[in-house]
């Protein structure tokens, strides 16, 4: 007889999951009152303001894979599980997540959970949302690739999803994957209400969610801000302890920081580089500087001339990496808020390894860089300009200029930044494959695990594989790691997969980020989570 296991996540990180006006009035007061009547009494009624960026796309969970949209989705939706500040997972919509063999998973929902429009959250709302994301080949469809019926990119008919009854559905995977349950708090796995399933265009612009907050009427002012108010239908653990959250879409981090200093912004999760040396003194006990699951890099598209996955391209990628003085840049520009990368993951996730064979390519070695570049030139001479695209609203110019200068001075080529006005315009060129050079990339973990730093970014056809990298050996090791019977075996296989990455360098690892932020004198109970995002629902603020 098989022993039935109920999946329950445990903390998966060693420590602590990357990218003003406030609203008042009748809507917020009414929502707070409704929440109070339903038993979800908030500890305060003030509107908390935070910084963010305009989402790249309409707010459909399966088609959002950037920070601006993700920050909103995590407030207005609730998944099967949620992650606490330390990265531990707790059931949210799920009553239980069970498996006998890590292949077939039975998910039972709590009854009586509702979307903000009053309709009940049922099994088909998860199943139909996931199937729609796969059918449309949405940006996060890759997360469905383990499910029967999906191709390697996660697209197709997810035949492994079946509704058993209103509150139960099953998921059949292509192979055993012991950590599948730990992924289910990511936004790709959120449910959609019937109204959005029927009309996704309207639902993306005016989202109806099931999380602790909902979008206020007319609350999404594009390129300005989005106003969220407590969702009176939400009865989960993340009950809003304030009267709402307004996320302001700043065009520069300096503007956001100045608003924080003058108490016109309540919470900031990205201090500008101009303030790295002073923010802890400026904020006098209200600053945050702690490790987070954030990895920073820049990606060189495999289609870029002279940088393909051939002998010349690999030599040039390796030379570029050796030409970057990460120690000097992190010390001079970031002043202790970044740590030079030793791998492709993060030191705050279990299984981190800073001594993977091949990782020596992350050291600064000008002579080695010149030697490799000369070998590449012997194959095909290079006379172009090496550019690194970045968004000007994200505080990236200083480090991009420093990296470009390091490359230029070492290799004797012209390297320079390629600024975009905002994150959305950069991502539009990246996802549309119209960008003509390298570009900054980073990863704020979706769920606490090493696998998440590798598969979505470098797996063949993955939704965040912006450089279109593909390596069969890497893909095979990912598959083996996902099916490994123990965390230790999976971690070892993922390190082998990183050895492949160090040979190919589809992205050039730069550094790991601390979350550097702070909060105003007007708020209390501010906590930043494992992935650098403030736990907005915990924050209290007087009216």
Image (spheres, rainbow, N blue to C red):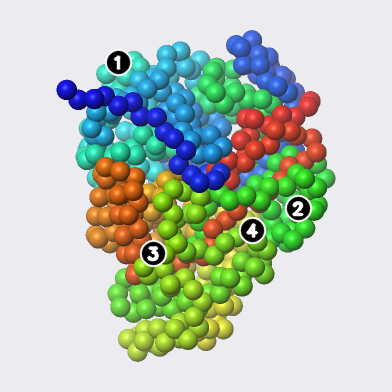
CA distance for labels 2 and 1: 53 Å
147 left or right of 112?
left
Q: Which residue is mark 3?
A: 356
Q: Which residue is mark 2?
A: 280
- Which label sits on residue 165? 1
Q: Earlier in the sequence, mark 1 or mark 3?
A: 1
Q: Secondary structure at mark 3?
A: loop
Which residue is painted at 55% across and 81% down in the image?
A: 408
Q: Secondary structure at mark 2?
A: helix
- Which label sits on residue 179? none
Q: Earlier in the sequence, mark 4 or mark 3?
A: 4
Quadrant assignment, res 541: top right
**Residue 508, position in %: x, y?**
45, 67
Q: Secondary structure at mark 1?
A: strand
CA distance for labels 4 and 3: 24 Å
CA distance for labels 3 and 2: 35 Å
**Residue 209, position in %: x, y?**
50, 26
Mark 4 neighbour class, 10 Å CA radius: few under 14, some 14 to 19, many 20 or more: many
Which residue is painted at 37% across and 84% down in the image?
A: 376
Q: Earlier in the sequence, mark 3 or mark 2?
A: 2
Looking at the picture, does residue 420 appear above or below residue 170? below
Q: Secondary structure at mark 4?
A: loop
* Tag nearer the camera, 1 or 3: 3
């Amino acid at each position: 007889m098989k022993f039935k296991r109920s999946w329950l996540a445990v903390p998966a990180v060693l420590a602590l999951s990357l990218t003003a006006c406030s609203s008042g009035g009748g809507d917020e007061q009414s929502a707070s009152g409704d929440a109070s009547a339903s038993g979800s009494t908030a500890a305060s009624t003030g509107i908390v303001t935070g910084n963010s960026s305009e989402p790249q796309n309409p707010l459909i969970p399966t088609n959002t894979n950037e920070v601006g949209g993700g920050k909103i989705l995590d407030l207005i939706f609730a998944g099967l599980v949620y992650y606490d500040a330390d990265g531990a997972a707790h059931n949210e919509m799920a009553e239980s997540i069970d498996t006998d063999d890590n292949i077939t998973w039975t998910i039972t929902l709590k009854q009586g959970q509702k979307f903000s429009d009053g309709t009940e959250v049922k099994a088909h709302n998860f199943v139909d949302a996931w199937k729609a994301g796969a059918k449309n080949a949405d940006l996060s469809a890759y997360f469905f690739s383990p499910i029967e019926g999906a191709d390697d990119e996660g697209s197709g008919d997810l035949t492994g999803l079946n509704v058993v009854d209103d509150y139960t559905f099953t998921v059949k995977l292509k192979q055993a994957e012991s950590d599948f349950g730990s992924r289910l708090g990511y936004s790709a796995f959120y449910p959609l209400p019937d109204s959005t399933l029927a009309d996704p265009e309207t639902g993306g612009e005016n989202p109806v969610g099931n999380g602790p907050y909902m979008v206020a009427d007319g609350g999404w002012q594009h390129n300005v801000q989005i106003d969220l108010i407590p969702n009176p239908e939400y009865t989960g653990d993340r009950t809003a302890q304030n009267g709402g959250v307004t996320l302001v879409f700043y065009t520069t981090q300096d503007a956001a920081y100045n608003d924080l200093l003058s108490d016109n912004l309540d919470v900031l999760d990205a201090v500008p580089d101009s303030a790295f040396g002073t923010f802890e003194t400026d904020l006098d006990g209200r600053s945050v500087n702690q490790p987070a699951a954030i990895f920073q890099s820049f990606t060189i598209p495999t289609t870029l001339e002279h940088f393909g996955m051939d002998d010349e391209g690999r030599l040039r990628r390796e030379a570029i990496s050796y030409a970057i003085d990460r120690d000097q840049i992190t010390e001079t520009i970031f002043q202790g808020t970044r740590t030079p990368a030793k791998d492709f993951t993060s030191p705050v996730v279990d299984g981190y390894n800073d001594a993977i064979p091949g990782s020596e390519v992350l050291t600064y070695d000008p002579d080695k860089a010149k030697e490799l570049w000369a070998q590449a030139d012997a194959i095909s001479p290079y006379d172009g300009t090496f550019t690194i695209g970045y968004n000007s609203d994200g505080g990236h110019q200083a480090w991009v200029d420093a990296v470009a200068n390091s490359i230029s001075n070492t290799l004797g080529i012209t390297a320079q930044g390629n600024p975009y006005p905002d994150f959305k315009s950069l991502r539009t060129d990246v996802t549309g494959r119209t960008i003509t050079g390298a570009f900054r990339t980073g990863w704020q973990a979706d769920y606490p695990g090493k696998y998440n730093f590798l598969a979505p970014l470098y797996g063949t056809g993955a939704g965040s594989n912006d450089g279109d990298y593909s390596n069969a050996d890497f893909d095979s090791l990912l598959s083996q790691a996902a099916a490994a019977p123990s965390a230790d075996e999976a971690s070892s296989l993922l390190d082998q997969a990183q050895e492949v990455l160090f040979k190919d360098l589809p992205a050039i690892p730069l550094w790991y980020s601390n979350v550097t932020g702070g909060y105003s004198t007007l708020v209390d109970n501010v906590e930043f989570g494992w992935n650098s995002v403030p736990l907005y629902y915990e924050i209290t603020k007087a009216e």
